[in-house]
Image (spheres, rainbow, N blue to C red):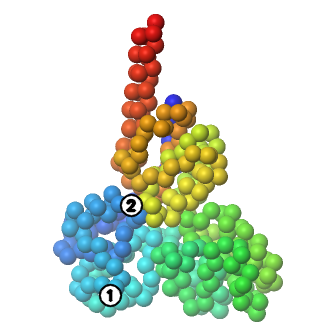
């Protein structure tokens, strides 16, 4: 059995930066809270808890504490409320996400509405939308049909950073059909996401089984699972290798491994090493059988 690791996987620059900043903050200050999960990875969040960082939610904002906000963003109103309550806000929003805040603000300031392609319930999209007063969130091309934009000369089009390009292409195509003005499309899908998706696609076409490692609520990991499933019949989304019974995997010839942008190296290394060990045990068994039968 061959075990192949994707050419691009795991922690992206934005998550790495957020995690380093959070651990640094935990070391520097007392009474540190984190507003929601820093990244969608149980291991990272558990490690922070062990350092004394308390997980809080939006309904229970503290006063005069140090509050770390998430890498995929937080709404403008929430950050203002935290500051108003005397908190020190350590904002770990990824620069690729905050760039979208600026695009929304600048276009709305010129009277140009902004269409956001994304999941309206995802914190990143809620954060992006909070920076504008005329924004429309669409999940797909079908939702674009109903937008009340016919009076406008221009609209801006941005996307949640983790979307596949072809989803935004399809929304733009549909908008061209229903909107006669100019569409200002901004490329807001981050390169790390693109690279991981391309590498996942390529690997999935060459293996008979794919393991995608990452949080069950991680948007970018779920998209890797979707892409892998389009090219491979046996795709498993796992959070760690420990939750997997490896015996059924012996039947595969080539197993591909990739991981979402919030999956730490240690979790990926463990998965590769356990698959390798299983492979070695299997080869040893085959050799022993061959010796015994000779
Ligand atoms: Fe930032 Fe892209 Fe990572 S938006 S948090 S570099 S997946």
The label number, if any, that marks residue 222 in the structure image: none
- x, y percent for residue 224: 55, 56
Of the two numbered discs 1 and 2 in the rendering, the one whose residue sits closer to the viewer: 2
Classify 10 Å Cα crowding around label 2: few (below 14), some (14-19), many (20 and above).
Answer: many
Q: Is residue 142 above or below residue 246?
A: below
Which type of secondary structure does the marked residue at label 1 adopt? helix
Label 1 vs 2, first from the N-terminus:
2
- x, y percent for residue 105: 56, 85
Q: Image point 43% across, 39% down: which residue?
A: 246
Residue 6 visible in the current orientation: no
- x, y percent for residue 117: 62, 74
Q: Is residue 94 above or below residue 285?
A: below
Q: Is residue 128 above or below residue 134?
A: above
Picture quadrant where residue 53 is located: bottom left
Front in this rendered view, residue 230 or 81: 230
Front in this rendered view, residue 282 or 129: 282
Picture quadrant where residue 293 is located: top left
Picture quadrant where residue 186 is located: bottom right
Residues tagged 1 and 2 counted as in contact (Cβ below 8 A): no
The residue wearing badge 1 is 83
- x, y percent for residue 69: 36, 75
The CA span between labels 1 and 2 is: 27 Å
Q: Image point 38% across, 88% down: which residue?
A: 80
Q: Image point 36% across, 69% down: which residue?
A: 37
Which type of secondary structure does the marked residue at label 2 adopt? loop
Q: How many callouts does the rendering have?
A: 2
The residue wearing badge 2 is 41
Residue 163 visible in the current orientation: yes
Q: Is mark 2 within 8 Å of ligand 1?
A: no
């Amino acid at each position: 059995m061959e075990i192949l690791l994707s050419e691009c996987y795991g922690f992206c620059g934005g998550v790495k930066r957020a995690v380093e900043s959070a651990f640094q903050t935990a070391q520097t200050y007392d009474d540190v809270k984190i507003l929601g999960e820093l990244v969608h990875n149980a291991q990272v969040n558990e490690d922070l808890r062990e350092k004394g960082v308390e997980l809080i939610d939006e309904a229970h904002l503290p006063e005069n504490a140090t509050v770390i906000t998430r890498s995929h963003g937080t709404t403008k109103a929430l950050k203002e409320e935290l500051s108003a309550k005397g908190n020190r806000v350590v904002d770990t929003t990824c620069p690729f996400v905050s760039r979208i805040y600026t695009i929304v603000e600048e276009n709305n300031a010129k009277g140009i509405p902004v269409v956001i392609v994304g999941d309206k319930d995802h914190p990143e999209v809620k954060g992006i939308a909070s920076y504008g007063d005329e924004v429309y969130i669409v999940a797909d091309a079908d939702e674009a049909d109903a937008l009340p934009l016919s009076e406008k000369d221009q609209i801006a089009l941005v996307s949640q950073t983790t979307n596949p390009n072809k989803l935004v292409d399809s929304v733009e195509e549909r908008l061209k059909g229903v909107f006669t003005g100019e569409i200002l499309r901004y490329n807001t899908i981050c390169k790390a996401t693109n690279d991981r998706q391309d590498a996942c696609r390529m690997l999935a076409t060459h293996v008979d089984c794919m393991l995608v490692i990452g949080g069950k609520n991680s948007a970018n990991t779920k998209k890797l699972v979707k892409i892998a499933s389009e090219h491979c019949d046996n795709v498993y989304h796992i959070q760690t290798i420990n939750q997997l019974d490896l015996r059924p995997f012996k039947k595969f010839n080539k197993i591909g491994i990739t991981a979402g942008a919030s999956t730490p190296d240690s979790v990926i290394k463990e998965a590769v090493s356990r698959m390798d060990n299983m492979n070695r045990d299997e080869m040893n068994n085959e050799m022993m059988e061959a010796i015994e039968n000779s």
